[in-house]
């Protein structure tokens, strides 16, 4: 009797209620990232490219003209590139609209 009771207790612990069975037809397409994550990745990639350009342009001005001019150009480009990178990333990741169908006669 004691053995049956212990086995029933183990069976009770190991059995969990299933709330929903997931069927394959429940999911048409599986996405690994949310669209907002795509925007973040695109922003960081654009920021890497644009900040590299700001550094290169700043160094070029520094060598050609003066270190003060290079610093001013770099700082202006540095802060402007945050805005430029955001606009480019949003443009690249915005959902494509479906082509409009012609009106029916």
Image (cartoon, rainbow, N blue to C red):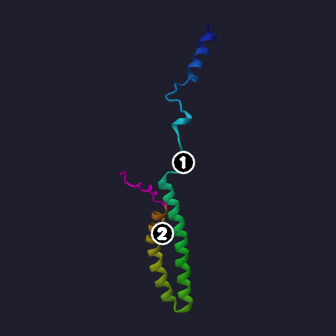
Q: Residue at x 44, y 56 (%)?
A: 99
Q: Which residues are magenta?
A: 93-105
Residue 40 is marked as none
Give coordinates of residue 98: x percent, y percent.
44, 55
- Hey, which residue is sitting farthest right in the picture? 3
Instruction: Identify whether 65 is placed above or below 51.
Output: below
Which residue of the protein is positioned furthest toward the left in this rendering?
Answer: 105
Q: At 48% from the left edge and 76% from the top edge, which residue is drawn?
A: 78
Helix, strand or loop status at disc 1:
loop
Circle 2 is placed at which residue position?
85
Judge from the rendering whether residue 98 lies leftward or rightward of residue 2; answer left or right: left
Compare residues 65 and 32 and report the one nearer the observer: 32
**For mark 1, does the 10 Å Cα neighbourhood hold few (<14), some (14 to 19), or many (20 or more) residues?**
few
Disc 2 or 1, which lies upstream in sequence?
Answer: 1
- Spot the residue most to the top: 1
Q: Position of residue 36 (x, y in %)?
A: 47, 55
State the residue lying farthest toward the bottom.
65
Q: Residues within 10 Å of mark 2 (few under 14, many from 20)?
A: many
- Front in this rendered view, residue 96 or 66: 96
In whole angstroms, how far apart are the C-alphas of marks 2 and 1?
A: 25 Å
Position of residue 103 in the picture relative to residue 78 (left or right): left
**Taking 38 as reference, is 28 above or below it?**
above
User: Residue at the location (47% across, 83% down)?
Assistant: 73
- The rendered magenta stretch, by its main secondary structure, is classed as loop
x, y percent for residue 10: 60, 19
> Which residue lies under the disc numbered 1?
31
């Amino acid at each position: 009797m004691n053995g049956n009771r212990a086995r029933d207790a183990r069976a009770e612990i190991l059995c969990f209620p299933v709330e929903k069975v997931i069927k394959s037809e429940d999911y048409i397409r599986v996405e690994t990232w949310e669209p907002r994550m795509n925007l973040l990745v695109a922003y960081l990639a654009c920021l890497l490219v644009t900040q590299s350009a700001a550094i290169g342009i700043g160094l070029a001005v520094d060598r050609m003209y003066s270190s003060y001019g290079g610093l001013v150009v770099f700082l202006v480009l540095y802060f402007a590139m945050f805005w430029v990178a955001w606009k480019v990333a949003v443009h690249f990741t915005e959902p494509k609209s479906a082509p409009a169908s012609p009106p029916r006669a």
